[in-house]
Image: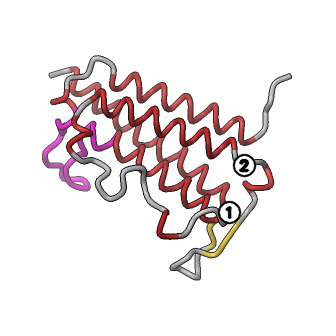
Amino acid sequence: MHDASEVTICRRLFDEKFVEVEQLLADLPPEALLWRPFESSPWRGPAASLGWLIAHSLSSTIYLLRRAEWTLGRLEWSQVDGDEGKDEFGPANHDPDYLRERARRVQTQVHAFLDSIDANAMNQTRPHAKRVDVVLSVRYDVMHALEHLSQHIGHAQLTRQLWALL
């Protein structure tokens, strides 16, 4: 029997995104991670590098899932951060092999989180720790993590295509 639960569908969608990260990094030289397709742009400033897009997408995925864990009462607010803290694109991330391994670690963390919740957990809400006018929900943070990861992977795919034209 096929499990069509919301949590299972989220796991499948996240896994599809992590396959795309693997594809982005396949046969990629380190200099490609630092390359920016547009040093200046009349619309919203310079484009991000391929490496920054991938690193940020991984970091923000963990940040949002940790925020969901806070909403569930599992973490202190001070523990809500990305997988590499404020240095989400430090020098180690200039290496495609390191980013590939980092993506695998993040995928493992995503699985651990999704394995720990069910439909009832998805419904949990809690007022934001610092902004009393905002109510956080586990469902919103899981969906936002998936959406944000997808958005930046799309940006990275376009950047990877531009790099291939050099």
The 10 Å Cα crowd at callout 2, few under 14, some 14 to 19, many 20 or more, is some
Q: Amino acid at mark 2?
A: Ile
Residue 135 as seen in the image, left or right of residue 147: right
Q: Is residue 49 magenta?
A: yes
User: Is 78 situated above or below 97?
Assistant: below
Residue located 28% across and 29% down the image: 96
Q: Position of residue 73 (x, y in %)?
A: 66, 66
Its colouring scheme is secondary structure
Quickly name the residue at label 2: 117
Q: Main secondary structure of the magenta part?
A: loop
- The circle drawn on residue 142 is none
Q: Quadrant of residue 4?
A: top right
Q: Quadrant of residue 9?
A: top right
Q: Quadrant of residue 52?
A: top left
Q: Amino acid at mark 1?
A: Leu
Q: Are marks 1 and 2 in contact (CB under 8 Å)?
A: yes
Q: Position of residue 20 (x, y in %)?
A: 45, 27
Residue located 64% across and 62% down the image: 74
Please provide the residue range marked out in magenta: 33-53
State the quadrant of the N terminus: top right
Residue located 72% across and 49% down the image: 117
